[in-house]
Image (cartoon, rainbow, N blue to C red):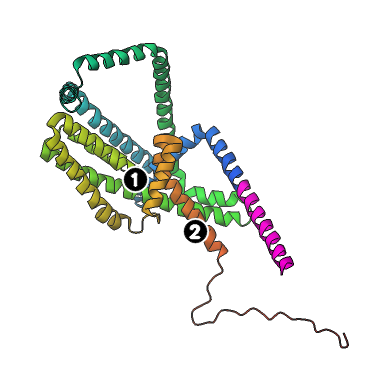
């Protein structure tokens, strides 16, 4: 018995060691893949943005092509309309904010003064001399780190330039995707050998449908959020209603976190301009709209959606934000959905097909055991 248990223990240890080595190889492969992705990020990021924009602009392009428009002409028209809409959104945000900039600055100053008056009373009892001392200390630290501020400013300018290059490249890629997109999968199938010529185009087609469903559903849900929240802000009398509504629509593409950020900005604006009572009313409006979205809008619009549990979405957004900041939060859910699509396809291929209805499952043939010769 002891010998048998020892043999089982050695077998279990060998199996565990083999599984551990396989996991280490997979982790090493993932690390190498992330390194390669980091090196190729200047190309991968514009390509990703172009794919997201293409999923948003493909339906009107497909409509025009279906009605006899040449692919190049349909792609050109949709790209130009998209540019006009994007410029209109930017102007709709910048112009109201610039026109109400002095009022916003006065409101922030008033809010700081109110906070200072509150801090000077009980229970904090912070005197003006303490506030002045803290202010002087902050100024001294800023002056001491002026070199770092200059470096950050230069870095910020470089980031803006890189962002503009990314946008221009993504727009050109979007145009070519709209014009030549349907030719891609057949071309890809011809370039791959054997089984990959079937599997990779199929996974790509499913991923494209999933990505399109995500972008379109998030856009529609974000539009509904922007309309209802903007209407509530207008009724309360909060300024900058249009920029706040546009911000709500844009941040809807980052699930969970985006709604919290847009709601926080709206509440802060209401607090600065209208006071705590209206800020509380705005908070209640945003919570009501978010509950309506989570329990009514998304189940109706997305149906089964991406097939991801809400906890998976939250963890994906958190992990993406910790790894790559805002970009990671934006791409976390689509990447998780694409991983789920690939896993589901792999599971389908590895699962034996079910027997036809009404037929019993095939029985395995009995194993023949050679009989021992007589006299043995």
Q: Does the magenta stretch include residue 343?
A: no
Horizontally, is 65 left or right of 248 in the view? right
Q: Earlier in the sequence, mark 1 or mark 2?
A: 1
Q: Does the magenta stretch include residue 10?
A: yes
- What predominant SS class does the magenta segment belong to? helix
How many C-alpha atoms fall within 10 Å of the one at disc 2: few (<14), some, or many (≥20)? Answer: few
Horizontally, is 357 left or right of 330 in the view? right
**Location of residue 130 in the rendering, given as x and y in whole percent from the top left corner:** 24, 16
- Numbered disc in front, either 1 or 2: 1
Q: Please name the residue that numbered disc 2 is placed on.
A: 344
Q: Can residue 69 be seen in this view?
A: no
Residue in front for this viewpoint, 72 or 105: 105
**Location of residue 20 in the rendering, given as x and y in whole percent from the top left corner:** 63, 51
**Location of residue 168 in the rendering, given as x and y in whole percent from the top left corner:** 41, 30
Where's the C terminus, which quadrant?
Answer: bottom right
**Residue 151: quarter of image:** top left
Horizontally, is 234 left or right of 9 in the view? left
**Residue at 32% across, 45% down:** 256
Q: Please name the residue that numbered disc 1 is placed on.
A: 255
Distance, label 1 to label 2, CA atoms, is: 23 Å
Looking at the rendered structure, the secondary structure element under dot 2 is: helix
Q: Is residue 17 visible?
A: yes
**Residue at 54% across, 39% down:** 34
Residue in front for this viewpoint, 35 or 245: 35
Where's the N terminus, which quadrant?
Answer: bottom right
Residue in front for this viewpoint, 271 or 356: 271
**Residue at 26% across, 53% down:** 297
Provide the residue span drawn in magenta: 1-25
Looking at the rendered structure, the secondary structure element under dot 1 is: loop
Which residue appears farthest toward the bottom when viewing the image?
A: 374
Q: With respect to residue 366, does 132 lie above or below?
A: above
**Location of residue 276 in the rendering, given as x and y in whole percent from the top left corner:** 14, 34
């Amino acid at each position: 018995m002891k010998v048998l248990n020892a043999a089982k223990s050695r077998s279990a240890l060998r199996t565990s060691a083999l599984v551990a080595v396989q996991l280490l190889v997979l982790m090493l492969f993932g690390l190498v893949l992330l390194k390669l992705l980091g090196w190729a990020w200047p190309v991968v990021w514009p390509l990703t943005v172009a794919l997201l924009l293409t999923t948003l602009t493909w339906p009107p392009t497909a409509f025009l092509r279906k009605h006899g428009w040449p692919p190049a002409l349909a792609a050109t028209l949709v790209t130009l309309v998209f540019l006009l809409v994007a410029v209109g959104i930017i102007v709709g945000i910048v112009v109201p904010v610039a026109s109400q900039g002095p009022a916003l600055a006065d409101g922030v100053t008033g809010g700081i003064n109110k906070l200072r008056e509150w801090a000077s009373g009980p229970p904090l009892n912070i005197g003006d001399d303490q506030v002045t001392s803290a202010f002087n200390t902050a100024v001294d630290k800023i002056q001491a780190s002026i070199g770092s501020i200059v470096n950050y400013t230069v870095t910020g300018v470089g980031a803006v330039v890189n962002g503009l290059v990314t946008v221009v490249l993504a727009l050109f890629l979007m145009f070519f995707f709209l014009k030549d997109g349907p030719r891609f999968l057949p071309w890809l199938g011809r370039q791959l050998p054997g089984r990959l010529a079937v599997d990779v185009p199929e996974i790509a087609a499913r991923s494209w449908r999933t990505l399109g469903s995500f972008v379109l559903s998030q856009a529609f849900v974000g539009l509904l959020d922007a309309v209802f929240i903007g209407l509530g802000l207008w009724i309360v009398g909060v300024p900058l209603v249009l920029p706040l509504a546009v911000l709500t629509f844009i941040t809807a593409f980052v699930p969970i976190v985006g709604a919290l950020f847009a709601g926080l900005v709206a509440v802060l604006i209401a607090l600065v301009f209208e006071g705590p009572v209206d800020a509380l009313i705005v908070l209640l409006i945003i919570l009501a709209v978010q509950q309506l979205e989570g329990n009514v809008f998304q189940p109706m619009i997305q149906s089964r959606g991406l097939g991801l549990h809400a906890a998976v979405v939250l963890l994906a957004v958190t992990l993406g934000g910790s790894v790559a900041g805002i970009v990671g939060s934006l791409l976390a859910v689509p990447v998780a959905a694409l991983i789920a699509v690939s896993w589901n396809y792999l599971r389908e291929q590895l699962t034996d097909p079910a027997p036809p209805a009404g037929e019993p499952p095939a029985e395995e043939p009995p194993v023949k055991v050679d009989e021992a010769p007589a006299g043995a």
